[in-house]
Image (cartoon, rainbow, N blue to C red):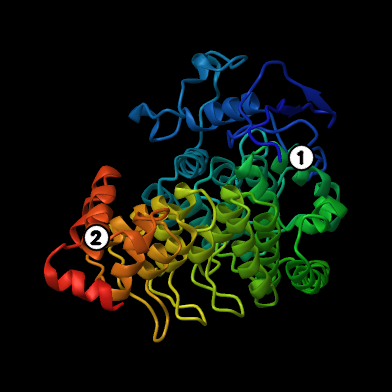
Amino acid sequence: MPRDVTATPVSINPMGRHSLTSGAHSSSTPHQAVDGLATVSNTGLASSMQADKQVCAQDVGNGPLAGASLPLTESPAGVHGALPASAEPALTAEEVLNRSLREAAALGHVEGLAASIAAGASLNATNKSGSTALMIAAQRGKLEAVKMLGAAGADIHATNKKGESAISLAVAQGHAHVVKELRLQGARLSYLQLEMNTPALKRFIDAGNWPVSAALIAAGVNTFAAFGQGLVTQLSPMVLRGLLGANDVARAAMRCSLASTGALQVDLDCAMACVAAMKYPELTKALHAMGARMPDSCKAGAERGLRDMVRTNDRAGVQAWLEAGVSVNAVNQDGVSALMYVTQVPSLDLLELLINAGADPELFDKDGETALIYAAKRGNQGAADMLLRHGVDAGLNGPGSPSALQWALTLNHLGVANRLLESGAQCTPQDLLNAVRSLTAGLPDAQISPRDLLQMATLRALHAGLVHLAAVIPTDVEAVQTYSMI
């Protein structure tokens, strides 16, 4: 799937039509819209960043905090098209107070907000563009300011002169946590706006614009509908069955009451399951950070999905399921975990990812075998080495199950055996026999004395650099007798 696709930002002119701006821009920038975003207000979801800067300059510049030289402020004379300072009409005390409220909102200055509210500032007073303090805070991504203004009673449904509301402004700028907060307060996009932006969500995801994608999902845009048949073909049957059932609930809840917390949670949960299944770890992480959880109906399929991604050596898929909170230690019906599977693929990078995610190397499958035993049987010396470096017991095995060393020697994986011995694995007489047989393969046993055979095995081990294996092949009389008996 495409990642980091460059998109052309959209600005909305006063007539409400899309106009493309020139130049290449990074699609991952939160304050940037992507070409093709359907409108979510009367005139559009996204507004021009240049207009936003002018509004902020006009609104913030003369407030009580303007003298602090904060980055959002500039004098009216510095604003394109602004009148000279001498031509500005004098502000009343009420206007100064209301402007200070909007200034504090733009800066996310909660102490300033509290002071302005306590002094009697009008929560819904607007600037020349019709923007309230709540709209400005939402557009700027000032979550704490949005919380404070909402709690104080600011109008969450108010719109500016372009028909934009606080939630649509937050969506356009990719402030997903602000969108979620506004939904919790009761703000919502209309059903028509959600339907219009369904295809836009797919474009944002395909472009790798995770902030706006997460914001659209938080606003209630249906992920499953956005991808349609394309999503169906990429999901495993178990995940698909879970998503279909949960998604019906999500759509029904969305139609009935977008303002309810339950509907919001279902939206987030189902969306996260979808994007994880489609291998978008960054977006999955963003949704999980907003409180999304794997739906119960999807958990079994998601755990299988994680193991499938490990078996196919798909790092993005593995990361996505881990970001979704899927248990890294979930096992199949045979007790096989993702960590056991990863020893069968040539990917130390993936092995380390699972270990860092909390994979338990001491889990036993139904046969009493661990991930280290899997690596030894496979002859995967790199995996065995990494597991041992992370402190795995070299001799750990279940009751009645051969040890990792026994498997390595039996299957002639002498490099793995040497590493296991270095880490403290104990060599039994049977292990000694297996080691000698592996090291002297091709020599006629009947024509060589036991002492010579042991010496030849030792020399071959040393020649191959298997010093720890050579060290367990003594050539004293007792050892010769032991070898002769077995």
Q: Name the element at disc 2.
A: helix
* Between discs 1 and 2, the one toward the N terminus: 1
Quadrant of residue 380 in the image? bottom left
Q: Horizontal placement of 38 versus 172: left or right?
A: right
**Residue 22 to residue 252: above or below:** above
Give the percent coordinates (x, y) of residue 306: 60, 62
User: Residue 454 bears which disc, if any?
Assistant: 2
Residue shown at the point (66%, 19%) measured from the top left: 24
What amino acid type should be assigned to the residue bearing mark 2? Answer: Leu
Q: Give the position of the N terminus as an image quadrant.
A: top right
Mark 1 against mark 2, which lies toward the viewer? 2
Q: Horizontal placement of 57 versus 47: left or right?
A: left
What amino acid type should be assigned to the residue bearing mark 1? Answer: Arg
**Residue 404 to residue 145: above or below:** below
Q: Nearer the viewer, residue 269 or 390?
A: 390
User: Residue 203 bears which disc, if any?
Assistant: 1
Q: Nearer the viewer, residue 406 or 232?
A: 406
Give the percent coordinates (x, y) of residue 141: 53, 45
* Mark pair 1, 2: CA separation: 68 Å
Q: Horizontal placement of 194 versus 175: left or right?
A: right
Quadrant of residue 356 in the image? bottom left
